[in-house]
Amino acid sequence: MARSSLRILAHLDWPLAVASGVLILFGLVALASVTVAKSPPDWSTFTQQGIFVGVGLVIFIGAVLVDYRTIRGLSTVAYVVAVLLLLGVLFFGKEIRSTTGWFVIAGASFQPVELAKLLWIIAFSAYLARFARAFDQWRHLFISGGFVAILIGLVLLQPDLGSAVVLGGIFLGLLLMANIRGRQIAILLTLLVVLGSLSYAFLLRDYQKNRIQQVFHPEADPLGQGYNVTQALIAVGSGQLFGRGFGQGTQSQLNFLPEQQTDFIFAVLAEEFGFVGVLLLLGSFGVVLVRTLSIGRHAREDFGAFLCAGVAIGYAVQVGINVGMNVGLFPVAGIPLPFVSAGGSSMVASLLALGMVQSVAVRRRTSGLES
């Protein structure tokens, strides 16, 4: 068994593994930077993140060793668990930053929506593997759309607009891989605009509406709703070509930049490592996305292809939203930067998803492996 496990791990997609490792290192460096500036330094968040990385790597290895094809048979269970998690947090969760989205147990917090995103990818990938070629029939579009609408509705009730957008983005991205007609896409997009408008009017809280309005009118409230984005833009711009250096960012070190360890960690990295550092960061994300899609394209069967595509889409949407809100293109939505932002839920879910992708890779390259 041990020898078989080593054989499996030896066939990892190493460009994907190295790129994701670089991203994790970026996150730890940013956390260390904002920590050393404090007097005295408080290393608790950095230590916790190191523990989360360690736990995530153990889960990653476990996911690689498990044959991803066995997960397909658990797709219904995955969806039910996602619904139960999102329902449970509404009744038993703790409100943090105006969102009831966390379970807190023995002082440790867990954000179930991060796991729900991956569970939705598993469930929808299994559905597409069975019915993708029949998606020109409206019933499959309505059935799958109803499934994701339930998840999105539960997330909006927290309310967590950013995660709702991620779930919808995964759904739309994977739909484009199915046998769907252009007319269906047009009608679906129209429906989404209508539902989005209704959500804005009846589900979103005032502070979330103000965040959306701030994107179009950043000058309206620079010291209030627009403060976070204004400080992030200053940090990103002041990095210039090579950055101010480790621990030398004025916006982050003097605490002008809020949420430095989570929402705006990209701005911290841009200020201290400049355009060159940002290129390396985004280049690493690019390698992760390209390798994940390539593994899916060469998967042995449809479920593996859809699974990898779903993970890549999930990563891409979250990176796009996080970077976009750091440079003022999107409203602040509380979406973490995968592998980089502080937070155990996001780190563990990202590494679990990566492990599933690597499971597809190693089983494409080898045969007869025990799991």
Image (cartoon, helix red, strand yellow):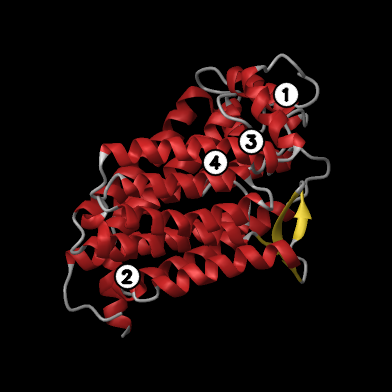
Q: CA distance from mark 4 to mark 3?
A: 29 Å
Q: Does the residue at mark 4 contact the one at mark 2 (Cβ under 8 Å)?
A: no
Q: Amino acid at mark 4?
A: Leu
Seen from the viewer's position, the closer of residues 202 and 100 is 202
CA separation in Å, label 1 and label 3:
14 Å
Tag 1 secondary structure: loop
Residue of label 3: 264
Q: Which mark is residue 195?
A: 4
Q: What distance separates the C-alpha of mark 4 from that of mark 2? A: 35 Å
Q: Position of residue 141 (x, y in %)?
A: 35, 53
Q: Residue sitting at 33 percent across and 59 percent down?
A: 307
Residue 24 sits above or below residue 87 on the image = above
Residue at image point 59% right, 43% down? 162
| Extreme residue toward the right, this view | 39
Separation of disc 4 and disc 1 at Cα? Answer: 26 Å
Residue that carries the numbered disc 2 in the rendered image: 68
CB atoms of marks 2 and 1 within 8 Å: no
Neighbour tally class for label 2: few under 14, some 14-19, many 20 plus, Cα within 10 Å: many
User: Which secondary structure lies at badge 4?
Assistant: helix
Identity of the residue drawn at 72% across and 43% down: 35
Q: Give amino acid for label 3.
A: Phe
Give residue 364's mark: none
